Image (spheres, coloured by chain):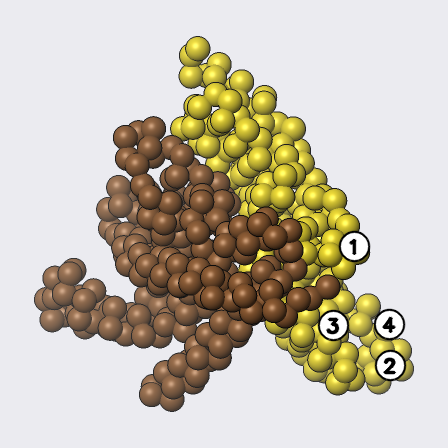
Amino acid sequence: MWDWSYAAEILPDLFRALRVTVVATLLGIAMAMVLGLVLAIGRRSRRRVARAPAAAFVEFVRSTPLLVQLYFIFFVLPDLGLTLSPLTAGVIGLGLHYSAYTSEVYRAGIEGVPRGQWEAATALNFSARRTWTSVVLPQAVPAVVPALGNYLIAMFKDTPLLSAITVVELLNTAQELGSQTFRYVEPITIVGVLFLLLSLVSALLIRRLEARLAFNR
Amino acid sequence: MTLVASVSNIVERLLPGALLTAELTVVGSLLAAALALAAGLSLTARAMPVRAAARIYVEFFRGTSMLVQLFWLFFALPAFGVELSPLQAGILALGLNIGAYGAEVVRGAVIAVPKGQAEAAIALNMSPGLRMRRIILPQAVVAMLPPFGNLLIELLKSTALVSLVTLSDLTFRAQLLRSSTGETLEIFSVVLVMYFVMAYAITLGVRGLERRVSRGLDVGGSWKTS
């Protein structure tokens, strides 16, 4: 039922595919962290033209499946004249999807900054930009780093969806191996174990980071 | 074809898929709710083995990807002599995965019920089962509902994954329609809106439910004497 030699044989292929999974996750979270911050600041803008679209984007993206969003990016954009490689489309999909979630995380962090800090910035005649960059964000962002880390793990676990738009990541490779040999148990089980290990280890690291941040305060 | 006609045509072609998506959401959430309650209460149990078993279940299903779980049930399980239909595999994966997240919600809500409530129930000589049913759960449910609403939307969105094991849900039919007509922009826009409408319906439903269960309790909304 379980063939150890076959498992050992496919392990190098799976590790190579793991690299694609990790790269997609890291690029995706980088995009989500930047775009999420933009959305969070946009939602607090004094101008309605910035506030309303940011809020609508967040609500819509959070209410629709990532898989369909990936299809949208991968199949619709080429028709509009913008052809993307599968990996690029996948990273953009992950980044856009998770930016809706990270923006809520940032929002919580920004709301946690005491009102007096804003008032002090006003009293010092800081511009809006300076208030954000030197008063609010330096206090808001470190506080939410652990929460962002949780979304890093969530995104990591969503990367198998990229196989649906032909990115050769971990699950896609496992399926490919399975269809060559008609043995699915080993490849898919190994993929599951790799996901479990990596997400448990990352969760542990985040918990430690959280403890350290709490200690520093 | 005018845009309106083309959109209504797409909606009509996708409707059976939306129906299956709704069915999967309902059945999947029933399984998830049952598992969440069982595992969540086990997490608060006094007996160590019960707690450990529930903890392993929760960490395992939260630690691995749902799509991997679905593929394992669909592709790997037959090697152990268990052949699941795509529908069975889909419902099982949805229920097991969301149930694990729900278990943490149940645990948190049960723990949050003030200790005095359980003590009062003990003082009234209630059995542990009765205590849970009559005293703890009715109060815990109020705290469970908002996160359960979020999980229900997660579940709805996750049903799209079953299209990858050949179930013809909304996403699957969209893909079919795309390959036969090539109207990618119209089709996927309509599909996104259909999912959004379903998620919004869930939001409204849960909000109504929240009002109902918090009636007569002095938590949440306004305190009423009645």
Vertical order, B59 against B141 (above or below): below
Vertical order, A159 against A69 (above or below): below
Among the two numbered marks 3 and 1 on one chain, the one whose residue lies closer to the N terminus = 3
Chain letter for mark 1, please: B
Q: Do the residues labelled 3 and 1 touch (CB within 8 Å)?
A: no
Dots 3 and 1 on the same chain? yes
Front disc: 2 or 4: 4
| Amino acid type of the residue that numbered disc 3 sits on in the rendered structure | Leu
Among the two numbered marks 2 and 4 on one chain, the one whose residue lies closer to the N terminus = 2
Among the two numbered marks 2 and 3 on one chain, the one whose residue lies closer to the N terminus = 3
Q: In which quarter of the image is the C terminus of chain B?
A: bottom right
Q: Distance between the residues labelled 4 and 3?
A: 14 Å
Which image quarter: residue B47? bottom right
| Amino acid type of the residue that numbered disc 2 sits on in the rendered structure | Leu
- Chain coloured yellow in this rendering: B
- Chain coloured brown in this rendering: A
The residue indicated by pointer 2 is: B124
Among the two numbered marks 4 and 3 on one chain, the one whose residue lies closer to the N terminus = 3
Which residue does the image show at 34% across and 86% down from the upper left?
A217
Foreground residue among B161 and A144? B161
Foreground residue among A54 and B94? B94
Percent across and percent down for residue B198 are: 58, 39
The residue indicated by pointer 3 is: B41
